[in-house]
Amino acid sequence: MKETICTIPINDIFMEKSGCPFCRMYDMLETQYATFITGSAMMDPETRVSTNKKGFCKKHFEKITEVGKRLPNALILQTHLQYILDNYFPKNTHSRPDKKKLLALDEMLHTCYICDRIQNDVEHFLRTVFKEWETNPEFRKLYQEQEFICLEHYQQITTISLKGVPSKHLADFHKDTADLAKKQLELLIADTTHFCNMFDYRNRDADWGNSRDAIERDLRFLAGIPLPEENKTEE
């Protein structure tokens, strides 16, 4: 498969064929940005101004502490906390609440430096995915061979494709995308139903089949929650 600087990361993501490729895309970007922020960009003034102002969502607060060392995280948090004190709290706490500051604080609590950076990158990646699917038969085959596309990314990718995929190719792209989500959904329904039926005393000696980790796979499809290394089944 012919590769360019734009297609190499996309091909790497889709070559794995395990789980949802767009979940893998997000995971890759999250790790890259968390590593960047707590590493080479930790003392970059422009980056620190942005992280001080925006902060992080719960998931990405956890991510930076997972991948970064304690001192870089402490420095990032120190200046972010100071920014919050300076900009959202009154100097005199006996005064009436400042509605503007409270609204600004609410806005800040719903922003995230990593989420914003990922969103910009994902839009670029998706343009490459759409173009490769449209023009590269090898990539289209690779796309069709994915294990599944999770529910969230089925909705997201299909919605963005309405503007990102030429109208003459849109129906075929939607078929490939919907098939990957729908087939997984049907499989999960069957396995979860079988799991529930196994608790009927009449099925005491029946075969569990592939249903033992049905709950975990349901959550991976519905919410992008990774499968645990060892699945526990209540028998």
Image (spheres, helix red, strand yellow):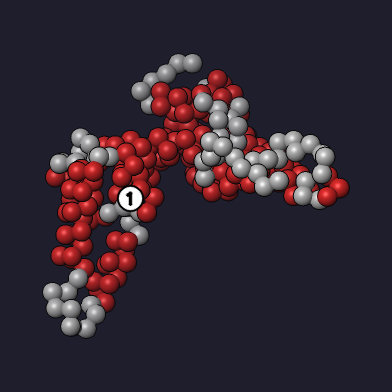
Element assignment for label 1: helix
Q: Quadrant of residue 220?
A: top right
User: In the rendering, at what x and y percent does residue 166 appear?
Assistant: 53, 37
Left or right: residue 92 versus residue 25 is: left
Q: Which residue is more in the foreground, 175 or 163?
A: 175
Q: Residue furthest top?
A: 1
Name above or below for residue 235 compared with residue 95: above
Name above or below for residue 135 compared with residue 38: above
Name above or below for residue 58 compared with residue 137: below
Q: Residue at x 60, y 32 (%)?
A: 147
User: In the rendering, at what x and y percent does residue 42 appear?
Assistant: 19, 41
Q: Residue at x 60, y 36 (%)?
A: 148
Q: Quadrant of residue 227?
A: top right
Question: Which residue type does callout 1 highlight?
Answer: Phe
Is residue 185 shown to the viewer in this render? no
Q: Quadrant of residue 31?
A: top left
Is residue 125 shown to the viewer in this render? yes
User: In the rendering, at what x and y percent does residue 104 appear?
Assistant: 27, 67
Q: Which residue is more in the foreground, 124 or 182?
A: 182
Q: Residue at x 61, y 27 (%)?
A: 145
Q: Which residue is identified by label 1?
A: 61
User: In the rendering, at what x and y percent does residue 21 appear?
Assistant: 51, 34
